[in-house]
Amino acid sequence: MKISVSSSDELKRLDSFLSTRLVQFSRTNIQKMISNGLILVNQKKVKKNFRLSYSDQIDIDIVNKVDKKKVSLEKWDYPLDILYQDKDFAIISKPRGIIVHPAPGNYDKTLVNILLHRFEKELENAIDPSRPGIVHRLDKNTSGLMVVSRNERSYLHLVEQLKQRTVMRKYYALVRGEPASGGIVEKPIGRHPKFRTKQAVVKTGREAI
C-alpha cells in the first residue's frame, strides 16, 4: 500500500498520521510496523516520530505485517444479523454495547469473537490475527452496518477503498436540543489529546461532515 502526503499533512508525526489512515490497526501496532521496517518513507526506514513533508511517499507492507504469529482468541456464540455475504466479504449489523475487537479488559466478548464463531475457517489466516476480518470500526455503543473481509484479497481491496474514500458511510443519531451551528457540522475528528480512548474535534483529525 502506498500513501502520498498532502500539503495539509505536513509536519505531522508519522505514527499519528497513519493512525488516522490505517484505522484497522492500533497506534501501538503501527509503531511496531515502523520499527520493524514494514513502513518506509521515501523508501527509507524512519522512526515513529518522523515529521512528514509534502509529497513524501509512504510504503506500507501490510501482507508481511509484524506479529503474524497466531493469537489465541475464543469463539463466541452470539446472535449476529448478516445482511449479505459472499465468498469475499459479509455485511453485518453490529449490536450496540459490543466492542469491535479485543482490547485490555475485554478479550472474549467482542465482535471479533462472534465472527470467529461464524467464519472461523475463512478467518484463520487473516493478515492481522488479532483483528481477523476487521477493516473499520464502530464505537461500543454505536450500532450499525459493518463490512467484514473473508479473505486476504478482499481485505486489501476494502482497506484501499476506505483509504481512497470510494465507500460512503452515513450515520444517524438522535440529538437532544438544537445544534447552534445549524444543520451541518463540518469539523476534523481525531483522537482526543488527553483522553486517548475518546475522539474529539482536533486540527490534525480527519475530515468529517
Image (spheres, rainbow, N blue to C red):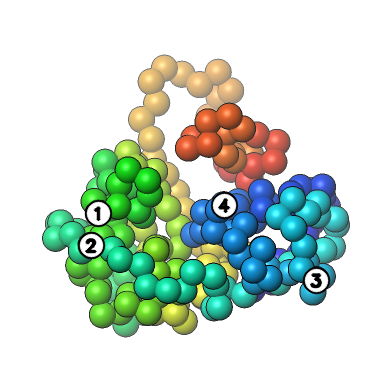
The amino acid on which the numbered mark 1 sits, given as a three-letter code, is Asp
Q: Which residue is mark 1?
A: 108
Q: Secondary structure at mark 4?
A: helix
Q: Quadrant of residue 132?
A: bottom left
The x, y position of residue 150, in whole percent, is 35, 76
Q: Secondary structure at mark 2?
A: loop
Q: Quadrant of the N terminus?
A: bottom right
Tell me which numbered mark, 4 or 2, is placed earlier along the sequence: 4
Report the Cα–Cα distance between label 4 and label 3: 20 Å
Q: Which residue is mark 4?
A: 27
The amino acid on which the numbered mark 4 sits, given as a three-letter code, is Arg
Q: Secondary structure at mark 3?
A: strand
Q: Which residue is mark 2?
A: 74
Tell me which numbered mark, 1 or 4, is placed earlier along the sequence: 4
The residue lying toward the viewer, choosing from 55 and 194, is 194
Report the Cα–Cα distance between label 4 and label 2: 24 Å
The residue lying toward the viewer, choosing from 93 and 127, is 127
Q: Which residue is mark 3?
A: 44
Q: Is residue 149 visible?
A: no
The amino acid on which the numbered mark 2 sits, given as a three-letter code, is Glu
Q: Are marks 1 and 2 in contact (CB under 8 Å)?
A: yes
Q: Secondary structure at mark 1?
A: loop
